[in-house]
Amino acid sequence: MRPSPGSPTELIDAAFGGNRRALARLISLIENDPAAVSAHMGRLHAAAGRAALVGVTGSPGTGKSTLVNEVAKAYRRRGRTVGIVAVDPTSPFTGGAILGDRIRMRDLSGDEGVFIRSMATRGSLGGLARATADVVRALDAAGFEVILIETVGAGQSEVEIARTADTVLVVEAPGLGDEVQAIKAGILEIADVLVVNKADREGAGNTVRALHAMLDLGAAPRGARPHGQMLAAAVSDPHAVGGWRPPILQTIALEGKGTDELIDAIEHHRSHLAVSPEGDQRRRVRAATELEMILQEMLLDRLRQQVGPGRLQDTIDRIVAREWDPYQAARNLMEH
Amino acid sequence: MRPSPGSPTELIDAAFGGNRRALARLISLIENDPAAVSAHMGRLHAAAGRAALVGVTGSPGTGKSTLVNEVAKAYRRRGRTVGIVAVDPTSPFTGGAILGDRIRMRDLSGDEGVFIRSMATRGSLGGLARATADVVRALDAAGFEVILIETVGAGQSEVEIARTADTVLVVEAPGLGDEVQAIKAGILEIADVLVVNKADREGAGNTVRALHAMLDLGAAPRGARPHGQMLAAAVSDPHAVGGWRPPILQTIALEGKGTDELIDAIEHHRSHLAVSPEGDQRRRVRAATELEMILQEMLLDRLRQQVGPGRLQDTIDRIVAREWDPYQAARNLMEH
């Protein structure tokens, strides 16, 4: 039987053949009906693994989106194809992702070597992280050579998404105030390359110096692993492996300045990953993280089905009535 | 047998008797050794439920910490005891939380009616959300009448933590730039009270008008429920219940201006919760969310033990080798 038009099999065939529309539809399917695609994920997974995955995160106001556009253009000038995945966990219906898209479309549209996709929260946060991994996998399998994964915010979940990349850029900008500096401390530790954007602004030198000083303190413990923590415990943290000190680059994205040097730094980091155990470690943590997200959902779904809605409602009632605390309630359901 | 000094039972007894040091040790135990406390959570849960839980979130640079301090002082002037829980998921080892604490200590120290606790990432993100819920429960059970739960960032995970409160304040400030405006769109929907802090700054009027305009568009769908989504599906989203339009208040926290009006707005929202179905709905979603977080961890832990480390390593190897995609790998483990 021929697969129906628009079936996952057909969409994957067409996307592999370079059909952008089929790729776009495949990605929509991944977002909207993951169950329909999950059985076909093996084909995408087997074909993926060649792209350079570059995560981009940083506080609001650092000019991340503009920088991502300029990095994409610089890669295009080197003849590389580029996928951009813009992830906005805070905005389920409006705002950043869509706005960013419009600006992007004007800049990069009409270039067959660029594919742009915005993703916002649909369903759960875990679902977004998982869908992002699947969309990246689809772009990778479809042959895009560089995939830029940009997060809008710089909260923990955003950092977590960026962190699944091979190379993580953390973008800063001068003069964003003290509270932003404080946040920086937390995300600094996941940076492979630090970028001070808006480097023509007053205080850029201070920001660079402050980052150097923080790197010098960098014997500080690496951060916790929010997702994939339990399964990845068997896999040591690749971010904790020594031998790579994040370079600090200055860019003026609005004028396209510094992006070539930035790409050189990304490539340099990739070469480092290729020859150090860190590259393999990172792939293993990524696998463990994805596996854990999927397992959590499957396990909870199975428990929910086994327990049934009546018992679940009753359990929630008892917690609200303070008869059971949530731990006791969970233990009771587990014994079921 | 008398419980050993510093046992959970003894710490809870002492904390209930007003011993701050015991309360602090109990909270440390909740953070560092949750397994030791979870069996005693029933006592805390049974005694809790009286405090007003106020979540405070908003973009960096809005002056949230200063505002929280001033709100605490305003509550103290009304004779209410106040707990402050400052949550910083982005900073596992340094930065915001600790800095904020020092400023706070200078301001509020020596007041027996205030208890301040900073929490940063230890272990998993889910673990932080769960520990925050438990610390809030402990403060509530120990008799603090108002508990302010402040998050440093405004990413999805931070929003999620703030959202477990009865009343959610979303703090804005004039002139934080476009990208921040975009993020605002996402967190606006969880706001019960909107605060434009730094209201003496240029552009405050514009910010207030923009927020009013966004509220007018507010038939927009409510956001997804990142945690607790699966179990809470049975419970309709309390944020979707109509009848409450978030008031927009202006404050100048640095000068202590506007905080009394803000407290009135919080109290007004509490009265609304007491007479509408929303209060009960919110408690049910909170219970479902907590239950889900605990179950996910228990289920994954059990699976991990049943599967064993060798099989788990082998599974991760096969994903990395692209023999299995993560979905197939998860299905294989589930069939185990």
Image (cartoon, coloured by chain):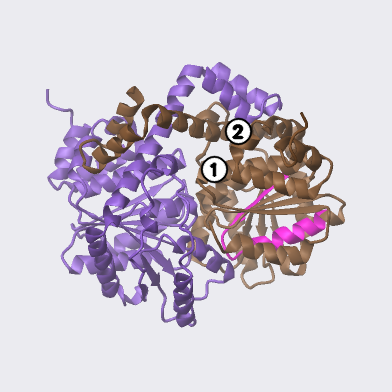
Chain colours: A brown, B purple
Residue depicted at 72% across the width and 69% down the height? A254
Give B200 or A244, whichever is nearer the viewer. Answer: B200
Give B271 or A79, whichever is nearer the viewer. Answer: B271
The residue under label 2 is A285
**Residue type (three-letter) at the residue carrying disc 1:** Gly
What chain does mark 1 sit on?
Answer: A
| Residue at far front of view | A1
Q: In the image, residue A285 lies at what x, y percent?
A: 60, 33
Q: In the image, residue B75 lies at what x, y percent?
A: 22, 66
What chain does mark 2 sit on?
Answer: A
Quadrant of the rendered structure where residue B130 is? top left
Give A132 or B34, whichever is nearer the viewer. Answer: A132
Query: What span is colored magenta in the figure?
Result: A53-75
> Is residue A138 visible from the viewing direction of this image?
yes
> Is residue A250 visible from the viewing direction of this image?
no
Direction from residue B239 to residue B175 in the image, left or right: right
- Quadrant (top left/top right/bottom left/bottom right) for the N terminus of chain B: top left
The residue under label 1 is A127
Circles 1 and 2, Cβ within 8 Å, touching? The answer is no
Per the image, label 2 sits on a secondary structure element best described as helix
Q: In the image, residue A126 lies at what x, y percent?
A: 52, 42
Give A52 or A207, whichever is nearer the viewer. Answer: A52
Residue depicted at 56% across the width and 59% down the height? A59
Residue depicted at 25% across the width and 43% down the height? A320
